[in-house]
Image: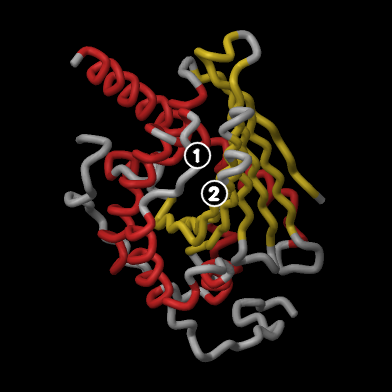
Amino acid sequence: MGILTDSQNKRSPSSSSTSPCANLRAAYHNCFSRWYSEKFVKGQWDKEECVSEWQKYKACLSQHLEDKQLSRFLEAEGPVSSTIEVASSRTTKTDDAPTGSSQ
Amino acid sequence: MVKAYTQEYTYKHPWERVTSASWKKFADPENKRTLSHILEVDTLNHKLDPSTGKLYTTRAITVHSPGPWFVRKIVRQDVCHCVESTVVDAKTRSMQLTTNNISLEKFIEVEEKIRYDPHPENPDGWTICRQETSIRIKPLSALASMAEKVEQRCAERFVQNSAKGREVMERICKYLEAESKGLARS
């Protein structure tokens, strides 16, 4: 039941679009968590860590994140964007409401 | 029409431990059973400002079945995406999280703000958590005619879920405490 162990025994795989990134996410998250509690809060905030974990995880997300609004946030980050294939279809979202039964 | 409510809670753990727990809250499979309404949490971007000691993070949170059943029936969607923005200031020891829904935004706007600060009575030992949630049904939406009822039911659900969230936070804090003692002894 370890809090820090990887989620191997994850049940109810409510698979979502980013599920393929679960392992990369766990790797990044474990690294980030450790950096946060062992360095950042103790005053060592001069250097960012877990960079390669983040790059891999982010590359996976940019492939699998289906929600357009969410991927905007992912693309919003500047300096590493050259390594990421930005989805070519940059659809400007019009105000259509597929679920809006009211109007 | 806006329904807003606030909650306050004291963790008898130092700020560093409580905010570490906050990052772990959605990660552990054990917690996934308690927080079953949270389907997926992904970090979308993050930025560290080394000159000020501020850490900015944006995460996507996918929530299952937001609101009561009659709302789900109208909006015909049982998954809701939210965006959570966090600012941690390591110098002043504050953590602020703001979460907004980005789907279903034509029907409803929910904003949740959480702050973790050192407790004024015991700044090195305790942490105070202030939570503020506002729920607003958009006028002219399909839910407008029953706005009050929807807001009430959503609010009840938020209260239930934040109680579960605290339970998980307490559990992680205890674990981290034990872990730090273990490290100290060796």
Q: Are marks 1 and 2 on the same chain?
A: no
**What's the distance in space between the residues labelled 1 and 2, CA to CA?**
8 Å
Where residue B119 sits, quadrant-wise, is top right
Specify the farthest residue to the top: B121
Residue bearing the label numbered 2: B48
The spot of residue A25 in percent (x, y) is 33, 57
In what element is the residue under mark 1? loop
Residue at image point 38% right, 59% down: A54
Q: Vertically, is B47 above or below A21? A: above
Left or right: B90, with B40 as reference point: right
* Coloration mode: secondary structure
Q: Residue at x 37, y 32 (%)?
A: A38
> Label 2 near label 1: C-beta < 8 Å?
yes
The label number, if any, that marks residue B168 in the structure image = none
Q: Amino acid at mark 1?
A: Trp
Identity of the residue drawn at 33% across and 25% down: B176
Residue at the (50%, 74%) spot, across then down: A81
In percent of width and height, residue B154 lies at: 61, 47
Residue underneath mark 1:
A45
Q: Chain of mark 2?
A: B
Amino acid type, label 2: Leu
